[in-house]
Structure formats: structure tokens, C-alpha cells
Image (cartoon, rainbow, N blue to C red):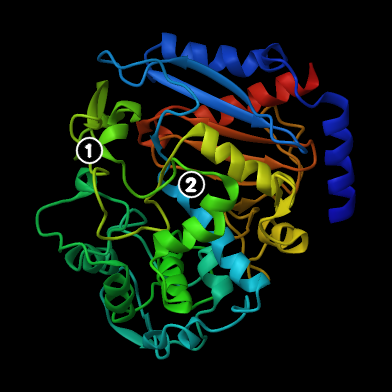
Amino acid sequence: MLGAIAATACSAAAAGAREPAAKFAAVQALIDRYVAEGKVPGAVVAVVRPGPHSPLFLKTGKTAFEGGVPVDEDTLWRVYSMTKPITGMAVMQQVALGKLRLDQPIADILPEYRAMQVLIDPAKGLDARPAKTAMTVRHLLTHTAGLSYTISGNGPLEKAYRQLGLMPGIGSLGRQPGDGEIPDLQGFAKVLAGLPLHAEPGTMWHYSVALDLAGAMLERLTGARFDDVLARQLFAPLGMASTGFSVAPKDLSRLSSNYAWIKPDQTPLTTPVVVDGPVRTDWLGPQRLLAGGAGLLSSARDYARFGQMLLDEGQFGGRAVMPRDTARLAMSNLMPEGVFFNKTEGNGAGGRSTLFDTRARPDGTPAGSYGWGGAAGTLFQVDRTRGLAVVVMVQFMPSQRWPLSKDVQTAINTDIMS
């Protein structure tokens, strides 16, 4: 099956690679409309095809509603949860090296996770029982580790996360009175281990801090800081010079502004407000908690390189960044048997793995597609069946404010079929 997908992708590339921008007229029209309607100040879309790296960049608008400069492929965007696929691939590189196994208990690397407790009733309190199943590397990669997120509910466990500062990637935007001090990554892992789990590992998909914990696992495994691990394994080999956990003062002019369309109490706004931008940003200077689930800044140019590597099954610029079989495995469904995301979808290493072909819908995708999105509207997809990877950079919160994901997929489908 995977060989057939690869062959289809290669033939798609041979038939239509390196299209002119006019080939993606529907995508360009879509982002132009979003800017004209005041939904976003600017947007950049990168499209890559298999083979030599020659991305197509579609762009429109500026970095801010209040002035700003024209966006381009080097504008910096907060990719939030699009950090997860990057962390996932870094873990899979260690699997390829034989340093980790997918079904290996993480307690082999993080011994504080050797005797976990599981909540008896997540809605009522923190009373817990001993876990029956060891948390594994696979569980971390697929949100089946039994962990939670402060954005995944407001029960007793999520409140405990807040009180202990276990809020990776949240920044000042999501902090509330009474929230604890943010720890560093190893402190995060140790404090998290002292709390019970939301569910038995391997039994359900529950969006969580699992990829942040995976970053701590990589630190412990390699003896290096997580940002150095990512730089060595991915960013340097791929030439992702603008991707990291913070922005340098000299690069503030490249930073887009992020806008909220809701008040802190979740009341909708008719006019968005700046919540982070060049004038005041949480990403200036070194970060205390290197959040492998939501902490990165990147550019369309950089993330397109990551997309190219996955589209070409681990290869980039004539070298193997990860073995082909590992890349294919990482983008496949890694979930425990019988567990699904959103009832019908799978989860690969840090991103959704589409199980069923839904191209009968205007916004459908082929089976085997892989990708994820970010809290500020950014999107990423690798479609090896049709031979393209797409990166969408925008900044608006919450990401559900506009139906950008469906709109983009519909536009891509229109352009591919035209």
C-alpha cells in the first residue's frame, strides 16, 4: 500500500511539479479574500512537490492590521501545535537509531513514570488507582498516554495542572490568577509525574501535553537541551535557520502580530485585539519551558523544508534526514488497536493520520494524509497520494473563529482538479 502511495505521488509530481502560481489560483483567491474581509492582516501559503526543493509561495497582506510590513516567506509566525509534528519526528529519528522503541515504557528513560496513578472519576476529584498499563513512547506520540491539557477541560486535573504551572506554550495570553510558576522542561516532567492520569494509557485519544513530555524524554535520552536536540536532528540538516523557541531582537521586524477574536471569558469580539506582536511578545529572549507541543516560531520558508522532507519520505537535498521506512511509519496511524481520534481518524507521530478517503466531499482528503494545525490558525498537511505538502501561515485565535481548514482544503482540491 505504501509503495503504491509513493508511486502515485511520484507520477503526480512528474505530471505537474513546479506549477506557476496561477495553478493555485483558488488558494490565492482564498487568502486574498480573508485579508480583504478583515479576518487576518496577512497570510502566506507554501506548496511543495516531491523532488528538488522548489517551493511555491502564495502571499498577501501585512504582518499587522495596524500598519505592519508585507508578509513574505521569511515572516515569523507562532505555529503553536504545529510544533508537535516536529517533536514527533525527532522522537522517530531516535527510534530509527535504535535508542528508543515505540512500545518501550517511557519509565526506562524517565523513571519517575514507573508507578502512575489513574483518576477514578475525572469529573469529581483527584482520587486515583494504580495504572494497569505502562505509558509508552507510542502513547506519547499519539495522545493516548492518559495525560491531559489545560485546554482540554476544566476538571480537577486540569485545575491542578494550572496550579502547578503545567501549561506549556500558553504564555501570558492564557494565564489566570492563581496559576503556578512555569517550570523548566525537566521540572515540568517531574511535577507532571506526581499527578494522576486522566485515563489508562493506551485506552483513549485525549489531547494533551504528551509531546511536551516527549521533549523532556529526548533531553534525558540524549543529555542535551531540547532545543539543541531539534537543531542537531532537524533544523540544521533541513536549513531551518529561522525556527526556534524565541525571537531575537534583530528579528522582531519579521514577527507577525497575533490577534484574539474572543475576550478572556470567551465572549466573542467583533473586532480583534492584538495579544502578541513585535511591540510586546512572549517569544522575546530565552524561554524557560521549551514546549515540544506548542512552543515554536517558524517561517513558511522553514516549515516548507520540513514538509518537503516528509513528502520525500525522510530525504532532503540529496541526504537522508531520517530513513524512508521510518518516515512512512511516522506518518501512518500509530494508535493502539481500537483507538481512534475523532471517532474515525488515526494519529501518527505528533499529527493526524487520515484513515479513510473522503474526497467525495469538497473539503475531503485521500487516506494516508498526515498533518496538524496550530492554535493561531496555522495549517500543515502532507498528501503523498497526490504528491504535495501545504503549509498555511496566519495568526488568529481561536483557530475555530474562521473555517480556514475546510476553506483551504476545498481550494486545494479545486486547484488540483482544474
- SS at badge 2: helix
Q: Are marks 1 and 2 in contact (CB under 8 Å)?
A: no
- Residue 102, percent from left and from top: 62, 75
Of all residues, the one furthest to the top in this rendering is 36
As drawn, 281 above or below 214: above
Whole-percent x, y for residue 171 in the image: 24, 48
Circle 2: residue type: Met
Q: Position of residue 198 (x, y in %)?
A: 39, 72
Q: Is residue 76 left or right of residue 89?
A: left
Identify which residue is drawn at 49% across, 89% down. 132
Residue 360 to residue 328: above or below: above
Residue 181 in sight in this render:
yes
Quadrant showing the C terminus: top right
Residue on which disc 2 sits: 82
| Side of 396 relative to 281 (left or right) | right
Kindly identify which residue carries mark 1: 281
- Which of the pair 353/19 is nearer the observer? 19
Of residues 398 and 343, the one nearer the viewer is 398
The residues tagged by marks 1 and 2 sit, at their Cα atoms, a distance apart of 19 Å
* Image quarter of residue 115: bottom left
State left or right for residue 394 relative to residue 11. Answer: left
Locate the N terminus by quadrant: bottom right
Q: Looking at the image, is mark 1 or mark 2 earlier in the sequence?
A: 2
Give me the residue at 36% from left, 58% from top: 291
Is residue 355 in view from this perspective?
A: no
Q: Which three-letter amino acid code belongs to the residue tagged 1?
A: Thr
Q: Which mark is residue 40?
A: none
How many other residues sit within 10 Å of disc 1, few (<14), some (14-19) or many (≥20)? some
Determine crowd level at label 2: few under 14, some 14-19, many 20+ residues with C-alpha closer than 10 A: many
Q: Is 371 left or right of 393, judged from the image as shown?
A: right
Q: Closest to the observer: 387 or 167?
A: 387
At a point 55% along the width and 46% down the height, the residue shown is 372
